[in-house]
Image (cartoon, grey):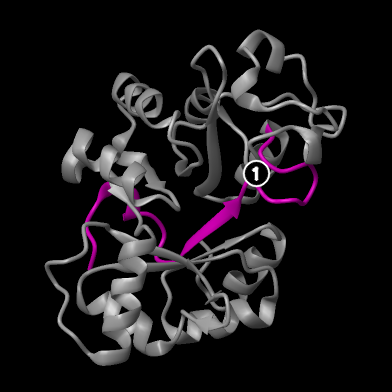
């Protein structure tokens, strides 16, 4: 099975997706604090880059949906962005603020733009946190840049090409042991109409030493079905539902 300090957490990896939506808006310090208070060891977040090169935790590339501001993060300096409020109340956090506030917590980081890759690499190198972060992206190029910088010292998830290879192998029983560079497959239930997370998909990932994390699952029944399939972790906005299912199954630490 995959080996990296990031993955040496609880037996089942429960992720607070963007911190969860229980008591505060996504990707805010209040949301992350609530998840930590509940006992979550794994947080998930996203990163963008400001106009002056600051790495911030935010999902969208603009501020309209969560802040009601018609502006893009890449066009604002950090001094400008720090005045903006999510849902009228919460500031946009720095990635470094999340990493330093909870030094025992592991953070899954979705790299959302080409521009943020090199500054993210620099931040990770400066803060020496490679043992407790995992980098994901919908861009194979971004993931390859991160792997080129750190090699196997950084935990990464599969990009689109790797997921396609793993899915094809699950369907054809093709041997792919040397064709995937990542430690973990982090995938949705489906890719469009195509089911991804089947028992064969999970078994194939495990056969090549890769864990499987599934996002974003809030329904308790579905969470239970995924556990029965043998997945290794679930990302959820409903942190309390995820905790309750795992507690009932003896998987909550």
Residue 189 as seen in the image, left or right of residue 116: right
The quarter of the image holding the N terminus is: bottom left
Image location of residue 11, percent across then percent down? 39, 65
Please tell me whether mark 1 sits on a helix, a strand or a loop: helix
Residue 183 to residue 207: above or below? above
Q: Residues within 10 Å of mark 1 (few under 14, many from 20)?
A: few
Quick check: can you spot residue 93? no
Residue 253 to residue 230: above or below? above
Residue visible at 55% across and 41% down in the picture? 46
Residue visible at 57% across and 24% down in the picture? 94
The reply to whether the magenta stretch includes residue 7 is yes
Image location of residue 56, percent across then percent down? 56, 27
Which quadrant of the view contains residue 151?
A: top left
Front one among 15 and 48: 48
Residue visible at 54% across and 47% down in the picture? 44
Quick check: can you spot residue 204? yes
Front one among 49 and 241: 49
Q: Which residue is disc 1 drawn over?
A: 37
Image location of residue 54, percent across then percent down? 51, 18
Q: Give the range drawn in magenta.
A: 1-28
Residue 28 as seen in the image, left or right of residue 41: right
Front one among 124 and 50: 50
Residue 22 as seen in the image, left or right of residue 195: right
Image location of residue 224, percent across then percent down? 58, 81
Residue 169 to residue 111: above or below? below
The kind of secondary structure the magenta stretch mainly shows is loop
Residue 29 to residue 165: above or below? above
The reply to whether the magenta stretch includes residue 27 is yes
Residue visible at 62% across and 12% down in the picture? 77
């Amino acid at each position: 099975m995959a080996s990296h300090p990031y993955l040496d957490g609880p037996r089942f990896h429960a992720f607070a997706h963007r911190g969860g939506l229980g008591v505060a808006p996504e990707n805010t310090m209040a949301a992350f604090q609530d998840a930590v208070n509940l006992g979550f060891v794994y947080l998930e977040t996203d990163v963008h880059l400001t106009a002056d090169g600051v790495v911030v935790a935010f999902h969208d590339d603009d501020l309209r949906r969560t802040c009601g501001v018609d502006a893009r993060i890449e066009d604002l300096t950090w001094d400008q962005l720090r005045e903006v409020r999510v849902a009228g109340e919460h500031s946009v956090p720095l990635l470094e603020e999340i990493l330093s506030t909870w030094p025992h917590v592991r953070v899954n980081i979705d790299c959302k733009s080409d521009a943020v890759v090199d500054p993210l690499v620099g931040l990770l190198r400066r803060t020496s946190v490679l043992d407790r972060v995992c980098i994901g992206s919908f861009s194979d190029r971004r993931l390859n840049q991160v792997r080129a910088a750190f090699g196997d010292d950084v935990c990464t998830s599969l990009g689109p090409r790797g997921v396609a290879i793993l899915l094809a192998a699950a369907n054809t029983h093709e041997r792919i042991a040397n064709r995937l560079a990542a430690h973990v497959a982090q995938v949705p239930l489906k890719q469009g109409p195509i089911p991804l997370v089947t028992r064969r998909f999970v078994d194939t990932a495990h056969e090549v030493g890769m864990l499987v994390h599934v996002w974003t699952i809030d329904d308790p029944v579905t969470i239970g079905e995924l556990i029965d399939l043998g997945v290794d972790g679930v990302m959820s906005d409903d942190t309390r539902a995820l905790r309750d299912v795992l507690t009932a199954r003896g998987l909550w630490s």
